[in-house]
Amino acid sequence: MFHAATKTADNEPTERDGVSSVAPHTDSDRPGQVPLDGVRGGELYFQRCRWCRTALFRRLLCPICTSTDMAWERSGGTGVVRHIKVVGRSAGRPRALAVIAMSEGFRVHSRVIAVPPETVHVGALVRLAVDVGPGPRELVFRPCDLPRGDEW
């Protein structure tokens, strides 16, 4: 059986044969709710593809199925350092730049703070931290210890 969707003169979606012409939207779907950098009020938000359920961070297309249909979700804020690089700055102290694999399945590039950069290692557990430094806000993480049984 073929179901057709129609629109009214004022472009409001209608139903025909009990089938809606548009997918339902929730408040978390609205792009204005979450900043483009994915950080709001000390919480990290990521996107999840509605088609293949792949977790993404700041993407327009899903790299698996090329869908543009994404939903925003809040991250638990914990991850594991997968790559680390200590970079020196000419006008300041060295910084630890890391690729962090988040527990939800996406990766972010960030700084690891609150410890000497040379002590950060691959496999270290980290937690999202609030950046209180001057200048533009950055995504930063601190080393942490998860309680036993919370490992993933």
Image (cartoon, rainbow, N blue to C red):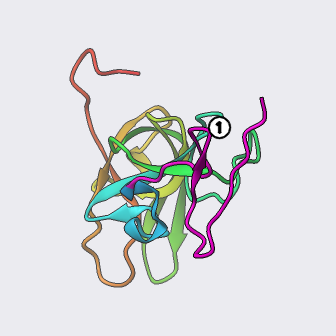
Residue 36 inside the magenta-drawn segment: no
Q: In this orientation, does residue 97 appear?
A: no
Q: From the image, which quarter does the C terminus lie in?
A: top left
Place of residue 22 in the rendered image (x, y in percent of width and height, measured from the top left): 59, 52
Report the side of 52 relative to 80 (left or right).
right
Q: Is residue 35 visible?
A: yes
Quick one: 108 or 39, which is closer to the camera?
A: 39
Q: Residues within 10 Å of mark 1 (few under 14, many from 20)?
A: some
The image shows residue 138, relative to residue 42, as above or below, that is below
Point 69% across, 47% down: residue: 62
Q: Residue at x 40, y 53 (%)?
A: 26
Range of residues picked out in magenta: 1-26
Q: Is residue 19 magenta?
A: yes
Is 109 on the left or on the right of 27, as rendered? right
Q: Residue flagged by tag 1: what amino acid is it?
A: Trp
Report x, y in % for residue 149: 27, 15
Image x and y of residue 33, in percent: 38, 67
For the point 56% across and 38% down, the residue is 18
